[in-house]
Amino acid sequence: MGAYFLVNRSEYQPTPPPLSSLPTQLDAWKMVGEYPIEKEVQDVLKASDTMNRIYQDGQSPSSVSFFIAFFKSQRSGVAPHSPKNCLPGNGWVPERSEIVRYPVPGSAEGIEVNQYIVQKGDSKNVVVYWYQSHGRVVASEYKAKFFVMADAIAKNRTDTALVKVIAPVSNDDVPGAIAMAQRFVAASFPSITAALPN
């Protein structure tokens, strides 16, 4: 009976401002490129809104890739594609993966994120991603799925966002790339939180 009610009642689906309204400057980081998601990728992703940009600050000659995919609802089987599965499919080999805490403004504990070190040929990247749903940040895919079900029952909503940051590793300096990713996450997190539904 409860399942019937959940399936048949009208779900709350928020309509936040477009992700393109995110600032092109985030503290010291300036947008240096923006790349719309290709139609073929969007057809598979099925996100309600996406943003794909490149940002650079004055501390490093390298730049970071910044991607967000927002989903108004996950009830019809649409859900974020985990980078954990997509990266190997695109030829990136994980060297190390862990859940770590990144410092962000306004939080003494920081946020838990997935941090991957991946390599393809001579290229190596630090990939950081998490799921964010109305003020909650989750790294684990299993926890994210649990909260989807809990929110569907308690709040009649299943919206979520996948946030991903990629920092290239130069001269095999993995700690330097991690530090760059941490700087960008700290600078961008307040704007990400403001842009997503609470």
Image: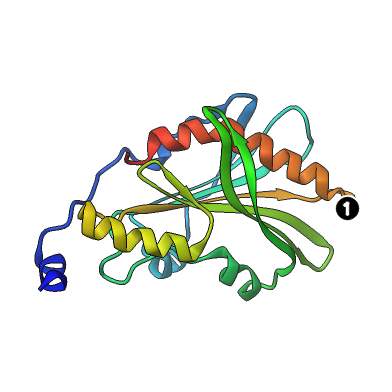
Task: Using residue 98 as the reference point, say whether residue 36 is left or right of it.
Answer: left
Q: How is the image coloured?
A: rainbow
Residue beneath the point at 74% across and 55% down: 125
Residue at the disc numbered 1: 172
Q: Quadrant of the N terminus?
A: bottom left
111 sits left or right of 97 in the view: left
Residue 148: tell me if it is visible.
yes
Secondary structure, mark 1, is loop
Residue at the extreme right: 171
Q: Residue furthest top?
A: 27
Residue at 22%, 51% in the rendered image: 155
Q: Position of residue 26 (x, y in %)?
A: 56, 28
Residue 163 image offset from top left, x and y in percent: 51, 50
Residue 103 at what x, y percent from top left? 62, 36
Task: Indicate whether 97 appears above or below 196.
Answer: below
Residue at 77% of width from left, 29% of height from top?
A: 59
Please state which amino acid type lies under the numbered disc 1. Answer: Asp
Q: Position of residue 40 (x, y in %)?
A: 44, 68
Q: Residue at x 11, y 73 (%)?
A: 4
Quadrant of the snapshot with the C terminus = top left
Query: In this view of the protein, which residue sits in the foreground, 130 or 54?
Result: 130
Q: Image check: 47 left or right of 137?
A: left
Return the residue nearer the eye: 62 or 100. 100
